[in-house]
Amino acid sequence: MSNGAHALIQTLVNAGVDTCFTNPGTSEMHFVAALDGTDMRGVLCLFEGVASGAADGYARMAGKPAATLLHLGCGLGNALANLHNARKARVPMVNIIGDHATYHTQYDAQLQSDIETVARNISTWIKTAPETRQLAADAAEAVAVAKGPPAQIATLILPADVSWTEGAEPAKAQAPVQAPPASDATVQAIAGVIKKSGKKVAFLLGNRMLREPGLRAASQIAEKTGAKLFCEVFPTRLERGAGLPAVERIAYLAELASVQLDGYDHLVLVDAKAPVSFFAYPGKKSDLVPDDCTAHTLVQPHEDALASLQALVDAVGASDTAPKLQSAERPNSPKGKLTAGKACQAIGALLPANAIISDETQTSGIKLASSTAGAPRHDVLTLTGGAIGQGLPVALGAAVASPGRPVLALVGDGSAMYTLQALWTIAREGLDVTTVIFNNRSYAILNIELQRVGAEKIGPEAKAQLDLSEPSIDFVSLAQGMGVPARRVATAEDFSGALKNAFEMHGPYLIEAIVPSEYEGLKLKALPHMLKALGSIPSPVAKAIKNKISP
Ligand SMILES: Cc1ncc(C[n+]2csc(CCOP(=O)(O)OP(=O)(O)O)c2C)c(N)n1
Ligand SMILES: [Mg+2]
């Protein structure tokens, strides 16, 4: 018998949850005290949004949940944006939210708030643990729910007295639930559609299908049937590079996505939702499936996506077909004044084998995919829910989950300032994370959006809301102030040199890349007109222009 906190931690460990990203307060002190002498690794984060983003990055790489330890409703609220990204990533996670002691809530003390209401935004399984004796069983259930299928975020609210009271015993892990494959009828129906001649078929692969086994199976089908392979716009974890099948990512800009999807009669969704525009724009469609195209869903989130896709491989007779693999190739080293495109080129030239890229580059990463396509195999983790401030925390969590693998965090200056505290934890844990801040001193993407939404007049007050140049942010000082060595560069040669050094040394390093915005002046003004024109020009020309704008 032990107190609730001890039994809770041991239960989590029994179920394989052995890493907890923490930002504790008084109500979590018994949990904190119980960490010693267990196999649970506590990783302190200095803002809750770092903890939740780190748990997301951890789950993407480890394929199992981490826990977060957060302080009441306000701590959970601070974590919300990255919990939202994690929910959209469909990763498993267990939140432990400390609460006031059960008998204290009646007093409406200073930190009293409605925790469950905050949690409802990101969890369907929410439980306030009612008593110590039951706590371990609740924790085992939370982990089982988080693991799924489907994987999700479970939130266990832990009143302080339930945590400190004696009389608890750890519970065993619940037996894993086997996900069923898609029904044979579904597989055969889709196989029938694909095999019918004269129709153009594309696949949209998402989530669990973007790892090697899913990619290989999809490529076998594509090679056998001539189908095109797309992947969703913001993948949770995409394995790519030399030796793996390549897939074309759906573009962020809806006009470009429409060009990509134009001309297909059937779109087969495999662990992905039908594509929609990121935002609505006056006079434009939200649903990106072309009007004369039929979407088919192969697999539901609770089903076994890989087994279903492999059944489809058999059903179309592609079991003996070899997948098409990306060949190894790297761009040359860039020269001259640094631009974001040249930085991407240098990354393609130098990326080490088995790297993990956390991509929150926004506009600066437009050339990233093409520059790294033939680089040694690597994983790319992206902004699944569109809530910025995710890149650094996800890199932190990915590094904790993947010792021995180099992590590269690529982050816009605006995005970096949301959760910059992640650098402190990266330094404290000695993680092998190289961070590149693309400092264009701007919310550049919003300058594009401002043009696109058709705003009538763009005055100085409007422009000022998107400008980060006064005062300019000194990322080198900020990084050094948190224990991360750093260097500022403004030429392509210096960028390559700094990146090479960072990859060669173990541990954290930050490169502040001074770059112009990718879209400025005339190019910025012309973009909305060009995007508008795409819908009314011949498809091959539109596709060529798309590849120029977003290669
Ligand atoms: C939580 C959240 N707040 C605000 C936004 C709106 N937003 C999207 S991109 C962006 C600016 C990104 O700037 P930066 O990281 O510098 O990239 P750049 O656009 O300059 O390439 C903002 C504020 C968002 N998506 N999520
Ligand atoms: Mg910027």
Image (cartoon, helix red, strand yellow):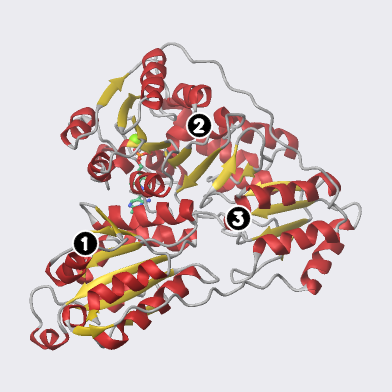
- For the point 25% across and 82% down, the residue is 1
Residue type, label 2: Ala
The answer to whether 410 appears left or right of 330 in the picture is left
Residue 458: x percent and y percent? 34, 40
CA distance separating discs 3 and 2: 32 Å
Instruction: Return the disc, 3 or 2, that comes first in the chain's sequence.
Output: 3
Distance from mark 1 CB to nearest ligand 1 atom below 8 Å: no
Judging depth in this view, the residue of 192 and 38 nearest the camera is 38
**Residue at mark 3:** 206
Identify the secondary structure beneath mark 1: loop
**Which image quadrant for residue 387?**
bottom left
Residue 217: x percent and y percent? 73, 51
**Residue at mark 2:** 526
Dot 2, how many residues are within 10 Å of its Cα: few (below 14), some (14-19), or many (20+)? few
**Which image quadrant for residue 105?**
bottom left
Residue at the limit of the structure toward the top, as seen here: 336
**Residue at mark 1:** 36
From this viewpoint, is residue 531 visible? yes
Residue type, label 1: Asp
Instruction: Return the disc, 1 or 3, that comes first in the chain's sequence.
Output: 1
